[in-house]
Image (cartoon, helix red, strand yellow):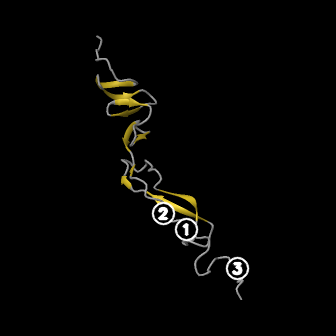
Amino acid sequence: MSHYMAGCRIENCDSCFSRDFCTKCKPGFYRYRGRCFEECPEGFAPLEETMECVEGCEVGPWSEWGTCSRNNKTCGFKWGLETRTRQIVKKPAKDTIPCPTIAESRRCKMALRHCPGGHALYSMPSLEQ
């Protein structure tokens, strides 16, 4: 007696609940909304234990770059660092799923090489006597 099962129309699927809904993907493929993918769609993260795509970490837009500074000073150095940040909008479905970086810094040229009032870190001997 042969058991007839409706042909699965889903690519890379091992077993189907219905013709259009996969319940188990072939090895190496992740299941997402009844279909099989080599990589999870954007905003979703692969869960290796179950080979499913689950909601990933969602971050907001980057802020503007901050003020160029070094040692909390905006003068007295030639080079400093400026930083920008973004917020986590939605935490991932599981704690094991990492979030993308939420802060980054880059080197910048300071607007003021010397601090006003002559308080430069490298004090020059005064030429005015």
Q: Tell me the residue that label 3 is attached to.
A: 124
Foreground of the two, 22 or 49: 22
Indicate whether 63 appears above or below 36: below
Foreground of the two, 45 or 47: 45
The amino acid beneath tag 2 is Gly
**Outermost bottom residue:** 129
The residues bearing labels 3 and 1 have C-alpha atoms spaced at a distance of 22 Å
Name the image quarter holding the N terminus. Answer: top left
The residues bearing labels 1 and 2 have C-alpha atoms spaced at a distance of 9 Å
Q: Tell me the residue that label 2 is attached to.
A: 66
- Tag of residue 69: 1
The residues bearing labels 2 and 3 have C-alpha atoms spaced at a distance of 30 Å
Q: Crowding at label 3, few (<14), some or many (≥20) Cα neighbours within 10 Å?
A: few
Foreground of the two, 37 or 109: 109
Going 56% across and 67% down the picture, which residue do you hit?
111
Say whether residue 7 is left or right of residue 105.
left
Estimate the x, y position of residue 65 in percent, counting from the top left: 48, 60
Are discs 1 and 2 less than 8 Å apart at CB?
yes
Indicate whether 43 appears above or below 14: below
Q: Nearer the viewer, mark 3 or mark 1?
A: 3
Say whether residue 74 is left or right of residue 9.
right
